[in-house]
Image (tube, rainbow, N blue to C red):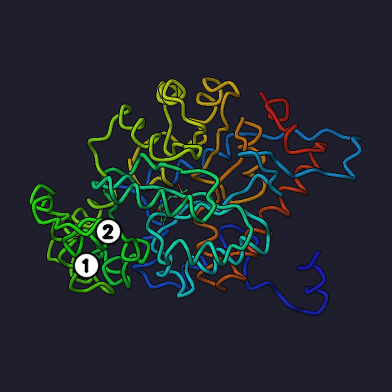
Amino acid sequence: GAIYRAGLLGRRPVVPTNPDALAEAARRRMTKETWAYVAGGAGQQRTVAANTAAFGRHRLVPRMLVDVEQRDLTVGLMGRRLPSPVLLAPIGVLEMAHPDADRAVAAAARATGTPMVISTQGSVPMEETARALGDTPRLHQLYWSRDDDVVRSFVARAEKLGADAIVVTLDTHLLGWRTADLDLGYLPFARAEGIAQYTSDPAFRALAEGRTPGGESLRPRLRELPAALRTLAAIARHHPGRFLDNLRSPQPRAAVETFLDVFSRSDLTWDDLARLREMTTLPILLKGILDPRDAALALDHGVDGLVVSNHGGRQVDGAIASLDALPGVVETVAGRVPVLFDSGIRSGADVAIALALGADAVLLGRPYVYGLALAGADGVRAVLEHVVAELDLTLGLLGVRSVGDLGPDHLAG
Ligand code: FNR
């Protein structure tokens, strides 16, 4: 409606509604390194391509003469009623796209009532993001650091700012083979002002300064830490603002591995979940589940929800398209916990397809970063409004009154 009215006055929207045009406009706005980091994925980009192509293999079948004058887009999740089944995916290092970074995304979330999953790798301390969110629901995405004190500290901070859940991302315990970034030397990453989310964390700072949060010397413990973390800690101590600069090296991959090491560890197993469970009473969601057997294990371990995701094709080149993994997980979970979905959502019609295949809600990823690059908070808001408006129209045109009613019935067999 707003776009149509502006059109009557001869104005075209700054943020395109066409997903390809949106990406193209953002590409022109970003440096080539930032574009590579945001749009790129693993290896030959097969999974990046598969994620969106998968939607093209499903066909919605509209029904006629249903009264759809009143449509209901709301969904129940984590004990809340959300205005739509769309959440903002956790995306790190947003300062690359726009200086307002997480603050702008939070402002758009607030303007639209869209829950935000705050990234561990946020460019802004989560407390600041939370302030910008006002009362808007927030979840905290966790990369499981090598240091349990850091994990505990992040979880405590998330609890304090009213997070509804902890979303543990499992698929990034090693950084994927991201060819475009590797060939450009991971420069935007290295130039980032620093992941303020980390440098603002008391446990991380204590680590960097060589003492425990209780104040005792950490030197003996530091010696036990992997070399990578020791390096990062030393760098953070001397250059709290721009510690990533120092990770630039002739071997960009080695530098990024070093950097990632503090975020995540690759020796975690299902048994470690119990430790996280002891740290918090918040619901725990696992992000990155693709195999129904892992969905079953997650249920056995008492998790409170899953996010079917392949990290936007950024981790395993050749991994199954996230949408192709969704039905198997949905079948295994059989309604016992919510199943969220991401990786490939570009439009409201895509949301409808994911919901028809059994997702309870979806996370929007790259498209909102494109909106951010184009017009800051307004750009993120425009992208969200476009997706939700198209979902609302699609629902009506399908002859469906409520998003909760979308199901396999609305797909061609
Ligand atoms: C991500 N993603 C991500 N996930 C996460 O759990 N923590 C993070 O910090 C990030 N950071 C991040 C940065 C960038 C630039 C991208 C594109 C993605 C993954 C994200 O949450 C989500 O799974 C994907 O973005 C979904 O794929 P599409 O829909 O964006 O293609």
Q: Amino acid at mark 2?
A: Phe
| Tag 2–tag 1 contact (CB < 8 Å) | yes
**On the rendered image, what quadrant is the C terminus found in?**
top right
Vertical side of 47 occupied by 240: above or below: below
Q: Is residue 283 left or right of residue 186?
A: right
Residue 396, quarter of the rendered image: top right
Crowdedness near tag 1: few (<14), some (14–19) or many (≥20) residues, C-alpha within 10 Å: many
Which x, y percent locates residue 116? 55, 54
Image location of residue 320, percent across then percent down: 41, 33
Residue sitting nearer the eye, 47 or 138: 138
Q: Regarding mark 2 in the picture, which secondary structure is present there?
A: helix
Give the side of residue 137 with respect to residue 401, left or right: left
**Which residue is under mark 2?**
204
User: Which residue is found at the position 69% from the left and 52% from the top?
Assistant: 388
Could you tell me the amino acid type at mark 1?
Ala
Work out which quarter of the rendered image holds the N terminus and state it. bottom right
Q: Residue at x 55, y 51 (%)?
A: 364
Q: Provide the residue designation for mark 1.
A: 236
Residue positioned 50% across, 26% down in the render: 329
Mark found first going from the N terminus, 2 or 1: 2
Residue at 74 percent across and 78 percent down: it is 11
Whole-percent x, y for residue 391 in the image:
71, 48
Give the secondary structure at mark 1.
helix
Q: How many marks?
A: 2
Q: Image quarter for residue 30?
A: bottom left
